[in-house]
């Protein structure tokens, strides 16, 4: 009798241990906005007739369920166990400790004498640290990001009065629609621009959500004078390489094809152009160059000023970089690097795309902060080969 009672107690204890629920999260060091895959796994031995589980919302994260709940039988410890799994994706909104849970599974099970009875199984909460987003822009983290730019016709050779339709589609794997950046502005003094309503779509996959945003513009120049729509940078954090990257909506030339034919005709010369010709012949080459500059369009003047800025030794973003180095703070150096690199992109100066690779690996890599931080070495890499050790001081 005692032996039978002991066996019964062992069986009951095994059954109690099997009725469990837990939150499963992989080993990772997420940044703000990065997808954290979460699996809710329950193991039950009781016969379940009804179940309800609601994942808790929070002000500290966004979440989405990736697929339908799965129920299956598994052999665990020599026993058949009913296994429940729900796959979710969690996106932290802030840096610092992130708490997920507790989560309670409300079950109705078959008890003694085939009577239904309630059973609540709770998964204890988990916590993991979230690092700050490594860039100054709105946090955007993804496994992959692609930009597709479609034009209805050649933008630099429009027919007179023709409107260009430009469609830009951004596709990001591993993020939510509201985490993609807002529509960029396409405005120039010489441009008429109309933006159609944007479209944001979400597609769920077992690996995570895939988000697409589509922007449409109807563009037409106010005059026939050609111009250039500048490029638009979209900075994002690559969760695979653990580095910041920049996707780009490319620059395009813009204008009517007829402008090149018309500007050579004397009947279309403006007073400024006639004056420029007079001073060119009267005062020689130097005066002619000055008159040509005075007769330039606003766009051409801006291009020339941009070229002068490329040659200018004064760069406030470089000075901010060197101030950040003196603080010996890697996050301060990373924040100061973004304006410096953005200025070089705007001026068309050479960039390799690897300027902050080592710094991003130190801050956000899977290895953590195992190595010592050398601010001067990081600065030399950010400045690139065009700057020598003298620029570090």
Image (cartoon, rainbow, N blue to C red):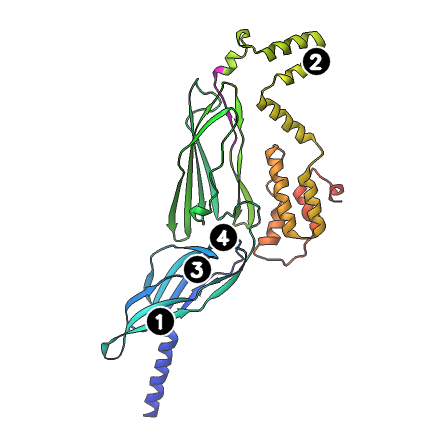
Q: Which residues are magenta?
A: 250-258
Q: Quadrant of residue 63?
A: bottom left
Label 2's element?
Answer: helix
Query: Mark 1 highlights which residue?
Result: 120
Residue 384 can be seen, yes or no: no
Quarter occupied by the C terminus: top right
Q: Nearer the viewer, residue 186 or 247?
A: 186
Position above or below: 267 against 210: above
Residue shown at 68%/44% (left/top)? 321
**Which of pointers 3 and 1 indicates the residue nearer the eye?**
1
Gap between marks 4 and 1 measured at Cα: 32 Å
Mark 1: give few (<14), some (14-19) or many (20+) Cα within 10 Å: some
Instruction: Say few, some or many: other residues with alpha carbon within 10 Å of mark 3 (under 14 / 14 to 19 / 20 or more).
Output: some
Choose the circle earlier in sequence order: 3 or 1: 3
Question: Which comes before the other along the chain, label 1 or label 2?
Answer: 1
| Quarter residue 22 falls in | bottom left
**Mark 2 closeness class: few <14, some 14–19, many ≥20 residues within 10 Å:** some
Task: Please give the residue where the numbered disc 3 appears in the rendered image.
Answer: 38
């Amino acid at each position: 009798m005692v032996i039978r009672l002991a066996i019964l107690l062992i069986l009951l204890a095994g059954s109690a241990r099997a009725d469990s629920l837990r939150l499963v999260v992989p080993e990772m060091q997420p940044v703000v906005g990065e997808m954290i895959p979460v699996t809710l796994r329950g193991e039950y031995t009781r016969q379940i007739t009804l179940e309800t589980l609601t994942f808790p919302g929070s002000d500290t994260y966004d979440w989405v369920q990736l697929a339908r709940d799965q129920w299956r039988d598994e052999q665990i410890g020599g026993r058949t166990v009913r296994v429940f799994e729900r796959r979710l994706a969690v996106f932290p909104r802030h840096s610092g400790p992130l708490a997920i849970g507790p989560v309670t599974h409300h079950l109705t099970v078959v008890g003694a004498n085939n009577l239904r009875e309630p059973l609540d199984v709770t998964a204890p909460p988990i916590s993991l640290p979230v690092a700050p987003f490594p860039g100054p822009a709105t946090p955007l983290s993804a496994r992959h990001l692609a930009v597709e730019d479609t034009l209805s016709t050649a933008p630099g050779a429009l027919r007179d009065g023709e409107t260009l339709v430009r469609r830009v589609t951004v596709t990001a794997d591993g993020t939510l629609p509201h985490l993609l950046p807002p529509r960029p502005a396409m405005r120039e003094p010489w441009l008429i621009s109309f933006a159609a309503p944007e479209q944001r779509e979400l597609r769920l996959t077992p690996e995570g959500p895939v988000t697409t945003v589509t922007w449409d513009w109807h563009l037409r120049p106010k005059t026939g004078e050609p111009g250039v729509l500048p490029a638009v940078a979209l900075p994002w954090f690559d969760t695979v390489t653990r580095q910041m990257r920049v996707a780009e909506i490319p620059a395009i030339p813009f204008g009517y094809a007829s402008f090149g034919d018309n500007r050579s005709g004397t009947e279309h010369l403006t007073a400024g152009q006639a004056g420029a010709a007079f001073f060119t012949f009267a005062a020689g080459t130097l005066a002619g160059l000055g008159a040509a500059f005075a007769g330039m369009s606003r766009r051409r003047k801006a291009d020339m000023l941009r070229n002068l800025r490329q040659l200018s030794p004064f760069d406030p973003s470089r000075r901010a970089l060197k101030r950040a180095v003196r603080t010996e703070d890697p996050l301060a150096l990373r924040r100061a690097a973004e304006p410096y690199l953005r200025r070089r992109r705007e001026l068309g100066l050479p960039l390799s795309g690897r300027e902050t690779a080592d710094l991003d690996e130190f801050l956000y890599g899977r290895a953590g902060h195992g190595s010592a931080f050398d601010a001067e070495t990081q600065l030399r890499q950010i400045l690139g080969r065009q700057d020598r050790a003298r620029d570090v001081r």
